[in-house]
Image: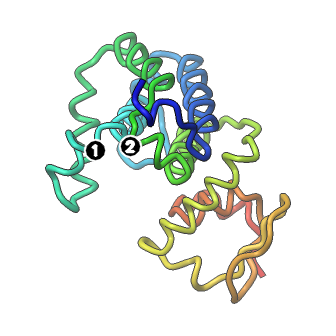
Amino acid sequence: MPLLDAIRFPLEDELRAERHRLIKTLAELTDEEFASGRTLCAGWAPRDVLAHVIGVDYPLAFYLPRGLRINAANQAQVDRVRRLSRDRLMEWAAHWADHPSTTTRVAAVFLLGDLGVHHQDILRGLGRERDVPDAVASAILREGVELSLALNRRVLRYRLVPTDGRRPIGRGPEVRGTREALGMWLAGRDEVAAELEFS
């Protein structure tokens, strides 16, 4: 057994659990919802979001060849997977959930937030809700903070006040909401703003 296989990295178990929760969400969708349902990722249906999060496990194949063109790499993975049937894609997803790549396991602390945001993209796009696990809610907020630094700088302009048990972040006018809603808003999901309290 290689040494890394014997190590449990921080949030690795939570990442696997969230992958299984995403698969359960997708399995409950109709064929039409799966193939063409609305998500908060512009231009992507639920199957496309799944293709993207699976692709994160294959950085050498999809990301390194495209350099810093992350959007191009994401779209290449989505386009490639659109040729697969739902059954074949879900079989791949089941394997992906149980066997994250070594790079993903090492980076689980960062990738749990990306996965959580995209799971919410699917659920919110279809008008569905769930109880977001505590570790995932915190990871979504962390992901939102990181994305905000690159996308919209909201994290630098507001004081973020989670209403579900975490310390405030930043300075400026207050924005109050759950960790999940704050994280989604910071990540550019503007539809979530209606759930937040601005002062």
Q: Is residue 123 left or right of residue 173?
A: left
Give 104 or 47, whichever is nearer the viewer.
104
> Circle 2 is placed at which residue position?
103
- Counting residues from the start of the chain, the first of labels 1 and 2 encountered is 1
Give 97 or 38, whichever is nearer the viewer.
97
- Identify which amino acid the numbered label 2 is placed on: Thr
Q: How many C-alpha atoms fall within 10 Å of the one at disc 1: few (<14), some, or many (≥20)?
A: some
Q: How many C-alpha atoms fall within 10 Å of the one at disc 2: few (<14), some, or many (≥20)?
A: few
Question: Disc 1, disc 2: CB below 8 Å?
Answer: yes
Q: Is residue 126 left or right of residue 68?
A: right
Hey, which residue is sitting farthest bottom in the picture? 172
**x, y percentage for residue 56?**
36, 42
- Identify which amino acid the numbered label 1 is placed on: Pro
Hey, which residue is sitting farthest top in the picture? 87
Residue 4, quarter of the rendered image: top left
**x, y percentage for residue 162?**
78, 66
Q: Is residue 164 left or right of residue 142?
A: right
> Circle 1 is placed at which residue position?
59
- Determine whether 2 is above or below 91 in the image: below
